[in-house]
Amino acid sequence: MSLNTAVIYGSARSERQGIKAARFVANKLEERGHEVTLVDSQDYPLPLLDKMLKEYDATSAPAAMAAVGAILSAADGFVIVSAEYNHSIPAALKNLLDHFQSEYLYKPSAIVTYSAGPFGGVRALINLRAILAELGTPSIPSAFPVSQVQHAFDDTGNALEASYDKRATKFLDEYEWYASALRQARNSS
């Protein structure tokens, strides 16, 4: 069962460490045979939200916005990778998410949060669940918090502790179940 997943990561920091967690999840999904696109806010620079993709005609949307819209439309689900800034998500991630709407509908999301400290971004997780539900991409029950992200993965996304590989298996099993079930439901309606 191959799925198409967009791993969405938004951080504008110059020394960002969460990209390692995003690469880890993308690698794990690819190992499971899925098509994966990493949507990094630095690779797809979007303006601060003025108009959503749906508010442009087919030829006038900024190129990066149209590209991300096509990726999200083709996806069966999403893995959102978020830092925790002041008990919430980064502005770059919120801006990236908010440019789209119908692209998310009836597709599940899974949440990976991280922090440099011991809590793994779980306070951002609470905010992110509400945001994703409003966007139409309900999050799966499990989450994948990463504490001390700077020490958890190497630059290419390989886990430095075996426990992350084990946790990822359970987390991605659940994501696959929801993504497959919702894909089947979308295809039958």
Image: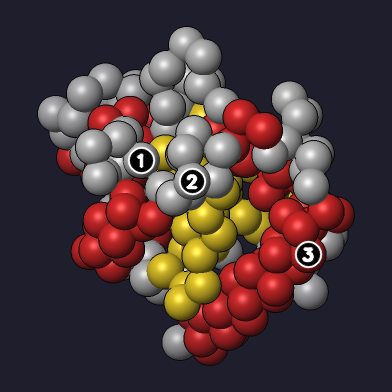
Q: Residue at x 62, y 77 (%)?
A: 174
Q: N-terminal of the two: label 3 or label 2?
A: 2
Q: Secondary structure at mark 2?
A: loop
Is 49 positioned to the left or the right of 152 in the image? left
Calculate the distance from the C-alpha at mark 2 to the C-alpha at mark 1: 12 Å
Q: Which residue is mark 2?
A: 118
Q: Nearer the viewer, mark 3 or mark 2?
A: 2
Position of 72 compared to 12: left or right? right
Let me know if residue 33 appears in the view: yes
Q: Split into 4 quadrants, where in the image is the N terminus?
A: bottom right
Q: Which sits in the foreground, 10 or 88? A: 88
Q: Few, some or many C-alpha atoms within 10 Å of disc 3 (few <14, some 14-19, many ≥20)? A: few
- What residue do we see at 51% from left, 72% from top? 142
Residue behind mark 3: 166
Residue at the image point whose x is 38% and y is 30% from the top: 65
Residue 84 disc label: 1
Q: What element does badge 3 sit on?
A: helix
Q: Residues within 10 Å of mark 2 (few under 14, many from 20)?
A: few
Quadrant for the C terminus in the image: bottom left
How many angstroms separate mark 3 from mark 2 (CA)?
A: 19 Å
Viewer can see residue 81: no
Q: Are marks 2 and 1 in contact (CB under 8 Å)?
A: no
Find the distance from the CA under tag 1 to the CA under tag 3: 24 Å
Name the amino acid type tagged 3. Answer: Lys
Q: Amino acid at mark 2?
A: Pro
Q: Earlier in the sequence, mark 2 or mark 1?
A: 1
Q: Where is residue 176 shown, x and y percent of the image?
A: 66, 73
Q: Position of residue 68 (x, y in %)?
A: 46, 37
Residue appearing at x 23%, y 37% in the figure: 86
Q: Position of residue 120 (x, y in %)?
A: 48, 48
Residue 78: image location, x then y, percent: 52, 56
